[in-house]
Image (cartoon, helix red, strand yellow):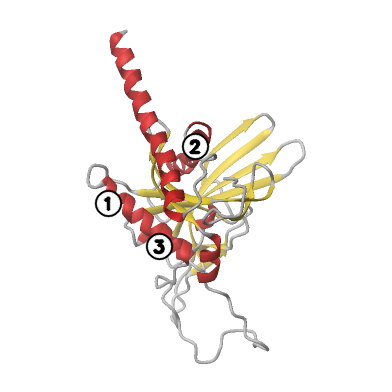
Amino acid sequence: MTKSGKETYGLGTFFSSIYNKPLSGLCFLNLSLLSVDTRTAYPLITEQLVRSDVQASAPKAVKPKNSKPGRPKGSINKNRKDVELSSFQQQLQACINASLALIGLNLAIVYFVYDGALGNNASLQAIIQTGLHLISKLRHDSQLYFPYLGEYSGKGKPRKYGEKLTLDTLTDAHLQSEIVEKGIKTRIYQVQVWHKKFPELLNVVIIVKTNLKTGRVAKVMLFSDDLMLDSETLINYYSLRFQIEFDFRDAKQYWGLEDFMNVKETKVNNAANFSLFMVTFSQLLAAEIGRIHARAA
């Protein structure tokens, strides 16, 4: 959200997809409860993201000078489930745990849905540690491999990685559906594959769109650590993310998220939380009014 002046706590420069350029503003992390039946998002917890804090605490990649190619002599295998979480991942994990405590045992929450920012192993482990399954998106150029199905040679460690996943190695056995609409052919595949930076086998759904006139091809790769989740449900759950955009729209248009004048940390946090709380409250109230009118009719 945009913000003028120079005194507001957490003020920074953030890229705006609406304006297609960086703008001075504030950034908030909002966790919402998504209803699959009504396709509605109910904001639960909102916390401010302060860019300077995130950047200062983020682990930096160090590349040794004059390093030789290949694996360093004497190095040992690391457990890829033991990860160091970034400041953002720690904050996100704390928000998830707070949300689950708020919900309690009234609802059995199974999945956490997030965009491609969590399409990495550290983020997956952070979500698994909360007891949830992650649904997210991988980079389109991610290197994925089918499990090796050949015979064991009898020497050394059994081979883990088989053929590399490409559009050419996907077969009709992996195809879940195919439709043609307005000159665009959409094919949906589902596979269980390895990524060399993830310790778990991944459940990956590949959506391939082909322009039949130009021949151009685009693909999206969604994934989850839940190997039993079918492709249709995985896509449906991931698409529910967009409902949260309506929450931000309503909070800005009707409940002051874009207009509050507070500048101190606590007051900024309170103003944002109140705006998004009113979104949840108004949605529940509107639904109840609708039920009353339906009974009266």
Numbered label attached to residue 256: 2
Q: Which mark is residue 59?
A: none
C-alpha span from label 1 to label 3: 17 Å
Question: Which mark is first along the chain, 2 or 3?
Answer: 3
Q: Which mark is residue 101?
A: 1
Would you place residue 69 above or below residue 200 in this image?
below
- Left/right placement of residue 92 relative to residue 58 reads left
Q: Amino acid at mark 1?
A: Ala
State the residue in front, 282 or 187: 282
Amino acid type indicated by mark 2: Gly
Under mark 3, the amino acid is: Ala
Q: In the rendered image of this protein, does residue 190 appear above or below residue 212? A: below
- Left or right of 101, for residue 143: right
Return the residue at label 3.
126
Disc nearest the viewer among 1 and 3 = 1
Tell me where residue 295 sits by quadrant. Answer: top left
Q: Is residue 278 at all visible to an observer of this figure? A: yes
Percent across and percent down for residue 90 are 42, 63
User: Which quadrant holds residue 289?
Assistant: top left
Residue 283: where, in percent of width, then height?
Answer: 39, 29
**Residue 37 in picture, x, y percent from top left:** 37, 31
- Residue 149 seen by the camera: no
Q: Nearer the viewer, residue 171 or 18?
A: 18
Q: Element under label 3?
A: helix
Labelled pair 1, 2 in contact (Cβ < 8 Å): no
In the image, residue 200 sits, relative to residue 291, either above or below, namely below
